[in-house]
Image: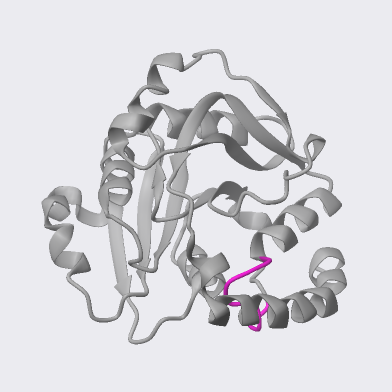
Amino acid sequence: MIDIVIPTMMRCDLEALKYSIHQALISDRIKRIVIIDNSTISSFSKELNFLDDAGDKLVVRTMERNIYVNPAWNLGVSLCSGPNVLIMNDDVFCHEKVYGQVDKVMNQLNVGICSVKTENCQKAVEYLRYIDDFDELIKSQEEFDHPDGDKTGWFFCIKKKIWKDIPSGLKLFYGDDLIFKRTKHMGYYSKNITSCRIGHMFSQTVGANPEANRKLRDEHSIYLNTRKDYVEKP
């Protein structure tokens, strides 16, 4: 079973978020969906009012201030109780069948973390064509066999027992780098599923935002100073 953690910055259309949550609600592989709402004063909850019947399967925590991405992951994981936790952006399209394949791969011997082949999509209608290509026979490859294997922070599932909170100084960047490196260091496999696909509305905010670029530079120093302890120590 999988718990899902979704931090939201409310910077994109809600179509992807609504689609993926609906698919998660009908999936028998998903135990709980935890949304960390960083928008503070938005109509977010009202816009999700069609989920009123979700019951205990959906948990929404609205922050009084923006705690940013990596701290939201830490908080979200602390609210999960299932054996596997899926960290997912609010701008990702994910079909019910994909959740099923992720759950099956996470139950394979010594798999600690997995991601899924990603396509750039702006609308659900663009993403739905990939469902026709869905392969019931699960195919995967070692995550670190390709150059960007440690850059899948928009969608990755990890065993909760090996989760380690990301250092507090890292707000926006490098959380996924640390997690993937630590998982590999612990001797677990990192899988990338290629027999199905997710859609991602890739963010354009960082390149055009001077403040985000400043944070990237600052957090790179923190990352370099904390990487060894995070990866190698319990």
Residue at the (52%, 74%) spot, across then down: 209
Residue at the (48%, 51%) spot, across then down: 202
Image coordinates for residue 58, horizontal then vertical, percent = 28, 56
- How are the residues colored? one colour
> Viewed as shown, does residue 60 lie left or right of 121?
left
Quadrant (top left/top right/bottom left/bottom right) for the C terminus: bottom right
Q: Closer to the camera, 221 or 211?
A: 211
> Viewed as shown, does residue 79 lie left or right of 207?
left
Q: Is residue 166 magenta?
A: no
Image coordinates for residue 119, horizontal then vertical, percent = 50, 35
Q: Closer to the camera, 13 or 154?
A: 13
* In this view, 25 is above or below 163: above
For the view shown, which residue lies furthest in the front direction? 208
Image coordinates for residue 102, horizontal then vertical, percent = 53, 34
Secondary structure mostly taken by the magenta-highlighted segment of the chain: loop
Residue 97, quarter of the rendered image:
top left
Image coordinates for residue 27, horizontal then vertical, percent = 33, 34
Q: Let me know if residue 107 appears in the view.
A: no
Q: Let me know if residue 3 appears in the view.
A: yes
Residue 52, quarter of the rendered image:
bottom left
Residue at the (15%, 60%) spot, across then down: 47
Q: Is residue 168 magenta?
A: yes
Residue at the (45%, 55%) spot, across then down: 89
**What span is in magenta?**
167-174
For the view shown, which residue lies furthest in the bottom direction? 64
How many callouts does the rendering have? 0
Q: Closer to the camera, 5 or 81?
A: 5
Residue 98, quarter of the rendered image:
top left
